[in-house]
Image: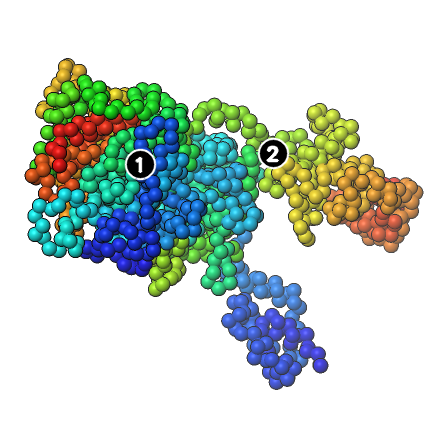
Amino acid sequence: MSARRRPRGLQLRHVSRCPWQVQQRRLLNHFISNEPVPAYTLDEGVPGTPTRFTLAVKDNIATVPSSSSTASPQWPTTCASPFLATYTSPFEATIVTQLRRRGARLVGKTNLDEFGMGSHSVHSAFGAVAQQPSQPPRQSHNKGDSDDDGQVLLSAGGSSGGSAVAVASGDADVALGTDTGGSVRLPAAYTGVVGFKPSYGMLSRFGVVPYANSLDTVGLLARRVGVIRRLVVGGDEQEPGLWAEWDARDPTSLSAAARRRCASVREGYGGFQEEEGDAGRVLRGLRLGMPLEYNIEELDGRIRDAWSAAAKALQESHGVRIVPVSLPSTKHALAAYYVIAPAEASSNLAKYDGIRYGSRDPEAASDAEGGVLYAASRGRGFGDEVKRRILLGSYTLSSEAMDNYFIKAQRVRRLVRRDFNRVFALDNPLHDKETFSLSDLPDSVAMEDKWGPEEVDFLLCPTAPTLAPRLEDVMNQTPLDAYMNDVFTVPASLAGLPAISIPMPLEPETAGDTPGTAGLQLIGQYWDDARLLSVADAVSKTLKAMAPTS
Amino acid sequence: MSRVPTAELRRYLLTGHIRCRDCLRARLPRSPGTTASPSRQTRAFASQNATIASIAPSVSAAPVTPLRKQLKEQAKALKASGTKKKRNADNQTVPGWELTVGIEIHAQLNTARKLFSAAATSFNDIPNSNVALFDVAMPGSQPIFQPETLIPAVRAALALNCAIQPVSRFDRKHYFHWDQPAGYQITQYYEPFARDGRITLYARDGIAPEDGDRVDVGIKQVQMEQDTAKTTAQPGEVHWLDFNRVGVPLIEIITLPQIHHPATAAALVRKVQMLLASVDACVSGMEAGGLRADVNVSVRRTEDVATGKLGTRTEIKNLSSFKAVEDAIIAERDRQIAVLEAGGVVEGETRGWSLGSTGTRRLRGKEGEVDYRYMPDPDLGPVVIGDDLVGHLAASMGVLPDPEIDMLIARYGLSAKDALSLMLLDNGARIQYFYRLLDTLDERLGIDSSAELETRSGHRHALLAVNWCLHELGKLTELSADLGMTPEGECKVPSADLAAILYHLHKREITAKVAKDLLWGVFRGDITSGAVSEAINANDLWFQEISEQDYAALADQAVEGEAKVLGEFLRFKQGKAKAYPQGKLMFLVGKMMRTGPEERMDPASAERVMRSRIEEVYLLALEGSK
């Protein structure tokens, strides 16, 4: 495709570069490259037999051409960027290898926001991703924003929107995404699937094209928590959990010793046990915190209602303690994220210069004195959102702005982590225990005793402040509106904590065009991933039970 | 073809001036091409042209100025006009101005692997054969710090008296260039691994005389960083890139701005190279491209020194020889002074220097200055260096150059210059060769090498070994290939064979001339290793010295007809001349050697016999005759 073609306005028709794309679900555009027929389906819960499942991989995770058959796709790794439109990686990402070993069969590379930068999967060189809610629209009077059948198209969320749609539509049992500031959780919330972001350093990033290294994590998407839990925690000895596997090729992957040390102060790493119908045992006596600062003005009323309904249901059915907590740094977290992430992005994307990747601007083919070869090629090659963040990052790193932005943002990041450490009952095994001043707390927080407020096991909050917007509305948004969607997901990313988004039922009469669910987010202390997944599974089942049957 | 008169030819060659157009044009068929274009002439020759032309009305009548005189006049005129380059030694200071220099030295570390990948470091391998995914910044690849690169780095920092930092970190320095695939270089900007060092330079290191016996220069910091790819220019607008070099570990040594003389700056770079070689931190020296220097130069008026404020500095990048360091600093100092004296302002900018040029050239100015946007590398954790590692490396470092030079001077009686050369040559391997040679020689001569060598006779064989290590081995490489010196101190002339040659020479069993021939034989491979004595046997090269009487007869023959020379000796004996006429003596000895069978004569014996003949026979005769 031409490097100059950019998604201008709504561009829903995907680019048919590959002949095997023909079977793609009409208009959803969630795959950049895929195989026609998923040959295996999920065969979960049969102990002793290798699980076979279909896997979709976000197209910023490296895959190699499959050697088995010449008819197989070449699996390029495009990052949805014109720069890498024809790039095939010579090596495979560790996480893909790990999942293959566990029986994964790759069915497609999914569409995304270019290099993972975006919240709606619309900033792609291959066109925007869309989702069709399974429920028929209640008021289908709109004209422009619909396909031939008059069906409304909604944002799939981003940046792992393609992966979320692949799971939601049944094209894949499991999908890999990347979560830098919520890029797995947000699309999961919008499309009504489960999206899990592990503790930073648990899953190898080797082969993941970096957006912001200190925040990037590999995330997993599936229709049920149990699938993800089984992969992460592991089944039996033939099926070791991903959590235990150190990757020597990723310097930020926790060493085997550190993994053991962290796991020794956590529960749930013993192995996978199906807790069918026993949500109560997992949830009984659990303390879930509801952060006061997450009840923001912009929060959609339907989500607020669903959130408190969910809390109430958990309290009533399983004796879960719901504790109001305060995370005062939350309001600065989003700003800090949009300083740190673009700064790292501007550095990571410096390699895409038109010399080795993408096409060189022929009119500026000189690097001689006064020449602007790189600037011209980069100006043509990147999409608007990527350019915006590179400029933002270049500015905040410049010598005159560094102290005021980048350094301050890093301080905020520390405060965000401190907030979490204060509310969680468990300590963060990566840091020395800190002491906190009670005078920093808002008055609204009730003290449990003279030592301070009650500590909690997990935080329970919405994943996003709104439901999936219509694509038409997304296109008319300012970039700042899109950034707002990350407000609840960014804090866990800054602190490197595990977090999961599960579908939470909405009142059916208020659900509108949406899939009928909103995202409910659970955040845990560092390396508490096993228990987080187990609790999320139980919460999920509880919520399903309370949901009105459709 | 008729002959062109010498005077005419000379005028043409020296001045490009052709007097008689007609005849020359007739003789030289391609006249337009051969007429030297005035633009090609140097200024000196151009001015000469005018004078010659005016004083020479006609060829035949022109008085022919002797060439030597002409050249002398030329030089004089040049000096008077002030265009002649002053010798560097006379150009260390400019009255009324103080120069301040700080230096950044980049040195390739002696490691097996790159800084952030397991790819091998190499120097002459097939281009692009030692490249890992991360080296070429493949999307999704990550840096893996190679801890063993710390060993030479810490050693280097210890040799520079630095404090090793327990925690240091890596930062990204951003700029676009084709030789840097990631768009940034990983370096240590905010938290380098070593700080606050010091390097002491002595007079023998070649510092400017103005700096006295010694001068201390502070080291601000030492940091680890990645090298870039190697660019090879090809004909046309084509450049070839070799990514074997990308990611190779470097250390950057940054001095404080405490250097005030150009020669001292060059001495510092030379000394850093010697220190790094002595602790085995560095693979190759400046001549092989293993070391590069950037210098920061500023000047201020002497009366401003008290204010403590330095002048605006410029940076001269990529100097690749000691001489270039000195020359570039002098040129840049003079340029800055000229700018300031003309009422101008020195711009903070980056400048370049090419070998043999007379001035620095502007590379980029302040507005074109790059903001490197330093950022901590988010993929790399801190480097934690334990005290145990530092302690172990400090203890196992061996002798540093300064104590070693002192030892060479004290123990073997070397001159400071020779000791320094021995240490510097072959990047520290020559001294190793010397020690091996001396060990073997000691053994053959039955000298207990552990005993003190205080006596002159004890020094003699060591001095012989030094001379041959420095000068005779040096001559071998003047013409052709190199010695093939290994870091352990072996070369194409095995130390055992040179020891055999020197053993025979020392025992006066062969002459120096034969010894030199043998050395060539070994170097070329004509004499197989271990067969030096056999070669002497086979070719009958043993020194069979002529008898005392034969020497005396030759001396008599040489003195014949040299009455005037003998007079000099008499003047000395009578106290009319202060110094013994050694030159005259050697003249007579030389004459003696030429007449006699040289291969059977020892110059020392000839000198001794000649001296005694003069004293005991001829002077007595002369005195008697008066």
Q: Please give the name of the residue rendered at 87% of the width and 44% of the height, measured from the top-left corner.
A: B538
**Image depth: mark 2 or mark 1 in front:** 1
Q: In this orientation, which residue lies closer to the viewer: B209 or B440?
A: B440
Q: Position of residue B401 (x, y in %)?
A: 57, 34
Q: Is residue A536 visible?
A: yes
For label 2, count other residues whose C-alpha is less than 10 Å away and answer few (under 14), some (14-19) or many (20+): many
Q: Which residue is mark 2?
A: B405
Q: Which mark is residue A42?
A: 1
Q: Is residue A457 visible?
A: no
Q: Please give the name of the residue rendered at 9% of the width and 50% of the height, measured from the top-left corner.
A: A140
Q: Position of residue B192 (x, y in %)?
A: 40, 35
Callout 1: chain: A
Whether A370 is drawn above or below A544: the answer is below
Looking at the rendered structure, the secondary structure element under dot 1 is loop
Q: Please give the name of the residue rendered at 37% of the width and 44% of the height, measured from the top-left corner.
A: A62
Residue found at the far top of this picture: A450
Looking at the rendered structure, the secondary structure element under dot 2 is helix
Q: Amino acid at mark 2?
A: Ile
Callout 2: chain: B
Q: Amino acid at mark 1?
A: Leu
